[in-house]
Amino acid sequence: MEVRDGWKIRKYIFDIAVGARLCVVRADIRIGSNRGGGSIQGTITDSGGSVVPGATVVATNVATRVESTRQTNEAGLYVISPLPPGEYKVSVSATGFQTFSIMFVSEASVRTLPIVISAGPPLR
């Protein structure tokens, strides 16, 4: 009888271990789905509403200082993806325009960030 009871205890412990491992795997899958981060996209326009093609858009992670740089297309559009969650400084520069900067927090989603820049020499 003791051998059977020992087997039942081992099986019970095994079942608990397998169940706990499945919970950890499920948590990893949920967390992993957010690892790709989010993205920002938008249109760069001037104060008159005209699009600004060829503008440089730089998203800098405040904590890590990692930069992601993109150029706007002929329609003034940009997309920076993926962006790990965190706080970012987004700067826009273009020839003949003042440099524009804004702070924002990236989450695991797509965020539209239209930006209007002003004509004039870059501010230092």
Image: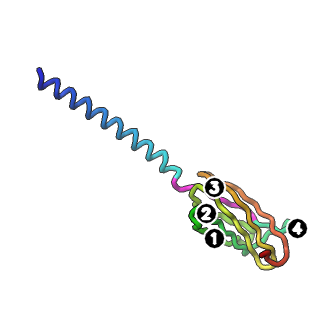
Position in image of residue 17 (x %, y %): 30, 37
The mark lying in front, picked from 2 and 3, is: 2
The image shows residue 117, relative to residue 120, as above or below, that is above
The mark lying in front, picked from 2 and 4, is: 2
Q: What residue would you read off at disc 3?
A: 106
Range of residues picked out in magenta: 35-43
- Of mark 3 and mark 1, the one earlier in the sequence is 1
Position in image of residue 104 (x %, y %): 69, 57
Type of amino acid under label 2: Asn
Compute the Cα span from label 3 to label 4. 29 Å
- Of mark 2 and mark 1, the one earlier in the sequence is 2
Quick one: SS at disc 1?
A: strand
Q: What residue sits 17% from the left and 23% below the top?
A: 5
Number of the label disc, if any, that sits on residue 27: none
Type of amino acid under label 1: Thr
Q: What residue would you read off at disc 4?
A: 48
Compute the Cα span from label 2 to label 1. 12 Å
- Of mark 2 and mark 4, the one earlier in the sequence is 4
Q: On the picture, is 108 further left or further right than 46?
A: left
Compute the Cα span from label 2 to label 3. 9 Å
Compute the Cα span from label 4 to label 1. 25 Å
Q: Residues within 10 Å of mark 1 (few under 14, many from 20)?
A: some
Compute the Cα span from label 3 to label 1. 16 Å
